[in-house]
Amino acid sequence: MVKTAVLVSGGGTNLQALIDANIFGELKNCELAAVISSNPDAYALTRAERAGIPSYVVDISIFPNRASFCDALLKKLQDLDIELVVLAGFLYVLTPAFVKEFPNRMINIHPALIPSFCGDGYYGIHVHEKALEYGVKISGATAHFVTTATDSGPIILQKAVEVEENDTPKTLQQRIMEKAEWIILPKAVSLFCEGRLEVNGRVVHIKEAENEN
Ligand code: GAR
């Protein structure tokens, strides 16, 4: 089983998708070993508690800078012997020193079709505001490995979602979560834990599942 930590900052609906997939046996070879929140008031912590997953707070507001916050986060992950880190609605950019500790072992879910509407400043509802401002007719979500450049790592899975005529940032966000994020994030995590992802430069190849018979 791959010891997995989920990093969160807010509501935790993507964490819930992972918890639910695990209950239905869809997260193969994955142990949801810890939830770590950057925010002590995140509802994601309640979801972790209800699912019986040990949860921890590394409160970003008490650290003088991003480097010291990331150092504390890294120490926690190392103490727990975490092998895979999942950023599920984790809204802070991690330092290069942190990212380098998990080469192709950290997965992020981004609420747009990368390389559109991504990079610094594109997080949460802002992504959907920008997509609507631009007037795109299709958006979606991307599950990708994390590298030192924001939202630029090798893409594991993507799913497109249509923009509707009267969409607001909120309605678009909700549809993208339901129809894309909550589906591809658990799939990407399972593929990783099953050892089915092969990274070749920036291209991720998905290997066939081994015959279970
Ligand atoms: C999700 O839409 C996630 O894709 C996004 O924040 C939301 C958090 O929701 N993440 C980013 O924008 C990262 N760049 P959740 O807490 O309910 O999972």
Image (spheres, rainbow, N blue to C red):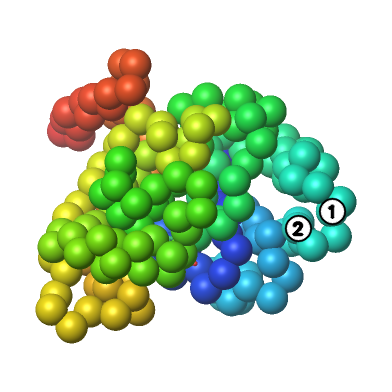
The type of residue carrying mark 2 is Ile
Quadrant location, ligand no. 1: bottom left
Q: Amino acid at mark 1?
A: Phe
Q: Cβ of disc 2 within 8 Å of ligand 1?
A: no
Q: Which mark is residue 63?
A: 1
* C-beta proximity under 8 Å, tags 2 and 1: yes
The answer to whether residue 109 of the structure is visible from this angle is: yes
Please name whichever residue, 162 or 133, is drawn nearer the observer in this view of the structure. Answer: 133
Q: Position of residue 43 (x, y in %)?
A: 59, 76
**Label 2 neighbour load within 10 Å: few <14, some 14-19, many 20+:** many
Question: Which residue does the numbered mark 2 point to in the structure image?
Answer: 60
Residue at coordinates 51% horizontally, 54% vertically from top-left? 121
Q: Which mark is residue 138?
A: none
Residue at screen point 18% across, 60% down:
136
Left or right? Give the position of 186 relative to 90.
left
Question: Looking at this view, is 200 or 164 the one in front?
Answer: 164
Q: Which residue occupies 65% across, 56% down?
A: 36
Q: Is residue 43 above or below residue 25?
A: below
| Residue 186 seen in the figure | no
Using the rendered view, name the quadrant where residue 17 is placed.
bottom left
